[in-house]
């Protein structure tokens, strides 16, 4: 059975991809079923500490969701296309929206650890694009547009929700850096010069894949640290996880409220 066939009976309206330390979002889902990635053809086997390996199916704020607890990063696989199968399976199973979350470093000193940042656009610094290779026109076009890749109407819903809930929500451009080493101070100066506000090691390939197959995308970064060279100490994986876990509660409230708004539409 294909991954889409396994997911389709649950009729997810939205897929969610959870970044490291963001399990608090999954905890709010009224869970009908969980399926290990290992049972879903094409799904990755993430190896980084803090990542689960399963899809949680159920309702969040009344909306049917499929939550991917764990993802594949470029630095694990050497491929930017490692998330192609899960994202296309969500689409085939009927989802219309993909909500991407990640932990990121901030390039703006005023947006500190623990803050949420709504992604408005991205810069792809990964050495590749997940759509390289023959194109299957049944999935999407050869040359998909990435204008308004982060859906303006979904951004407006998130902005309104954050205001109502009293959760500060910064906005900015997310740059994807290959990793797994963190950036050098010189690279951070370069990325700032390019116009990025946050930097991380995920999300961009997923957005490209999702837009290609017609999913609407929303993405929120949890600021885990100030980027290298901006703070007194550099980023570390342990600090990243700790700051992310603290902010995950805000993110969980925001995502649940977002689902409620969508379910009411
Ligand atoms: N750089 C890249 N990825 C990250 C960072 C960072 O500073 N923090 C969390 N993920």
Image (cartoon, helix red, strand yellow):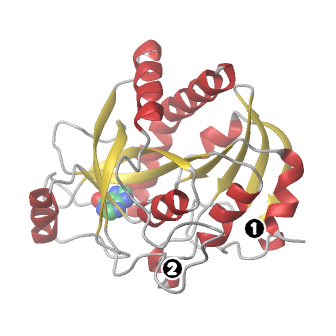
Q: Which quarter of the figure is the N terminus placed in?
A: bottom right
The residue that label 2 is drawn on is 76
Is 249 on the left or on the right of 156, as rendered?
right
Q: In this view, does 224 lie above or below 92?
A: above
Badge 2 element = helix
Label 2 close to label 1 by CB (< 8 Å): no
Number of marks in picture: 2
Say few, some or many: other residues with alpha carbon within 10 Å of mark 2 (under 14 / 14 to 19 / 20 or more): some
Using residue 32 as the reference point, say whether residue 176 is left or right of it. left
Residue at figure coordinates x 51%, y 38% from the top left:
248
Which residue, as the protein is rendered here, is positioned at the far top? 164
- In the rendered structure, which disc, 2 or 1, sits on the residue that comes first in sequence? 1
Q: Where is residue 137 in the image (x, y as percent from the top left)?
A: 60, 72
Viewer-proximal residue, 72 or 82?
Answer: 82
Q: Where is residue 170 in the image (x, y as percent from the top left)?
A: 29, 33
- Asked if 167 appears above or below 192 in the picture, the reply is above
Q: Report x, y in % for residue 115.
A: 34, 36
Which element type, helix, strand or loop, lies under badge 1?
A: helix
In which of the image's four quarters is ligand 1 placed?
bottom left
Q: 31 or 66: nearer the eye?
A: 66
Q: Which residue lies at the image location 40% right of the left edge and 44% below the top edge? A: 222
Is the C-beta of the residue carrying label 1 under 8 Å from the nearest atom of ligand 1? no
* Mark 1 nearby-residue class (10 Å; few <14, some 14–19, many ≥20): many
Label for residue 37? 1
> Between residues 188 and 92, which one lies in front from this camera angle?
92
Q: Residue 90 carries which label?
A: none
Q: In which quarter of the image is residue 85?
A: bottom right
The quarter of the displayed image where residue 37 is located: bottom right
Direction from residue 67 to residue 223 in the image, left or right = left
């Amino acid at each position: 059975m294909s991954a889409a066939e396994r997911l389709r009976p649950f009729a997810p309206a939205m897929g969610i991809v959870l970044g490291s330390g963001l399990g608090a979002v999954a905890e709010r889902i009224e869970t009908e079923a969980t399926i290990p990635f290992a049972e879903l053809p094409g799904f990755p086997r993430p190896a980084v500490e803090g990542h689960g390996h399963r899809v949680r199916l159920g309702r969040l704020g009344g909306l049917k969701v499929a939550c991917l607890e764990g993802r594949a990063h470029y630095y694990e696989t050497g491929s930017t296309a490692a998330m192609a199968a899960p994202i296309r399976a969500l689409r085939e199973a009927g989802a219309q929206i993909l909500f991407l979350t990640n932990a990121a470093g901030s390039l703006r000193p005023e947006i500190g650890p623990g803050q949420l940042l709504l992604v408005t656009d991205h810069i792809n610094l990964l050495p590749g694009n997940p759509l390289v290779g023959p194109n299957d026109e049944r999935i999407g076009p050869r040359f998909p547009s990435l204008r308004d890749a982060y859906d303006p109407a979904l951004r407006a819903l998130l902005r309104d929700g954050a205001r109502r809930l009293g959760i500060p929500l910064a906005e900015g451009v997310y740059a994807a850096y290959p990793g797994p080493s963190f950036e050098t101070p010189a690279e951070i100066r370069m990325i700032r010069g390019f116009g990025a506000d946050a930097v991380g090691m995920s999300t961009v390939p997923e957005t490209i894949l999702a837009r290609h197959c017609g999913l609407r995308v929303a993405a929120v970064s949890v600021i885990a640290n100030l980027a290298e060279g901006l703070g007194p100490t550099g980023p570390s994986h342990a600090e990243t996880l700790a700051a992310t876990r603290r902010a995950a509660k805000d993110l969980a409230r925001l995502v649940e409220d977002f689902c409620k708004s969508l379910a009411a539409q």
